[in-house]
Amino acid sequence: MERSGTRHRIIKKAQFARWMFMIGAAAVAFFWLLSWVATKYLDKLEQLSQTDAALAAQRISSMVQAVFVASVVFALLVGSYLAWYGYRAVRSECFPPPGSWVVEGRPVYEGSKARRRGWAQIILGIFMAVVACAVVYRSWSLLP
């Protein structure tokens, strides 16, 4: 759905709200399921710790390392996407960049405002990736 005179795909406010509700509900369900699985796993580890504490500690350490790796991969992906999106905005001097979805009624910036927003997004993406790596590196070194 293109608005005449723009290079963006326009989405109606009601449709955008429905999509955000569905994505939010899916995220809540996913994290509830993840929490339930983690609780069951930790219950098993608690039982294991009564018979073999060293093995239980090793498994907890492995689980924490897996969470760290997943977190840094997610942060790197999101940070990379933000930086790429910002680069597209700087290059095209249009924010959001051409071809992006825009909620009806939202402004589209051009020129220096678009470049500033694009550079801010590039910096945010790089910062997000660097901080995630630093936190994981520091936390990893604290593990046994």
Image (cartoon, helix red, strand yellow):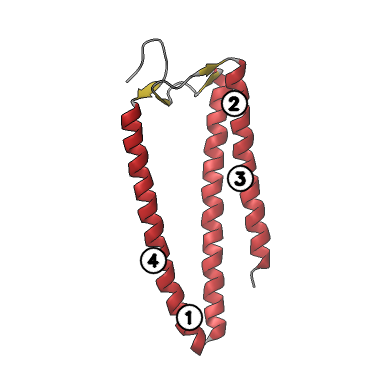
Looking at the rendered structure, the kind of residue marked 2 is Arg
Residue 114 pos. (x, y %): 57, 20
Looking at the rendered structure, the kind of residue marked 3 is Ala
Q: Secondary structure at mark 3?
A: helix
Looking at the rendered structure, the kind of residue marked 1 is Glu
Residue 108 pos. (x, y %): 49, 19
Disc on the earlier residue, 1 or 2: 1
User: Residue 69, labelled with which disc?
Assistant: none
Disc on the earlier residue, 4 or 2: 4
Dot 3 corresponds to which residue? 129
Dot 4 corresponds to which residue? 36
Disc on the earlier residue, 3 or 4: 4
Q: Secondary structure at mark 2?
A: helix
Q: Residue at x 56, y 78 (%)?
A: 57
Disc on the earlier residue, 3 or 2: 2
Q: From the image, which quarter does the C terminus lie in?
A: bottom right
Front-most of 24 and 81?
24
Q: Gap in Å between the C-alphas at discs 3 and 2?
A: 18 Å
**Pair 1/3: label in front:** 1
Dot 1 corresponds to which residue? 46
Dot 2 corresponds to which residue? 117
Q: Residues within 10 Å of mark 4 (few under 14, many from 20)?
A: few
Q: Gap in Å between the C-alphas at discs 4 and 2?
A: 40 Å
Q: Residues within 10 Å of mark 1 (few under 14, many from 20)?
A: some
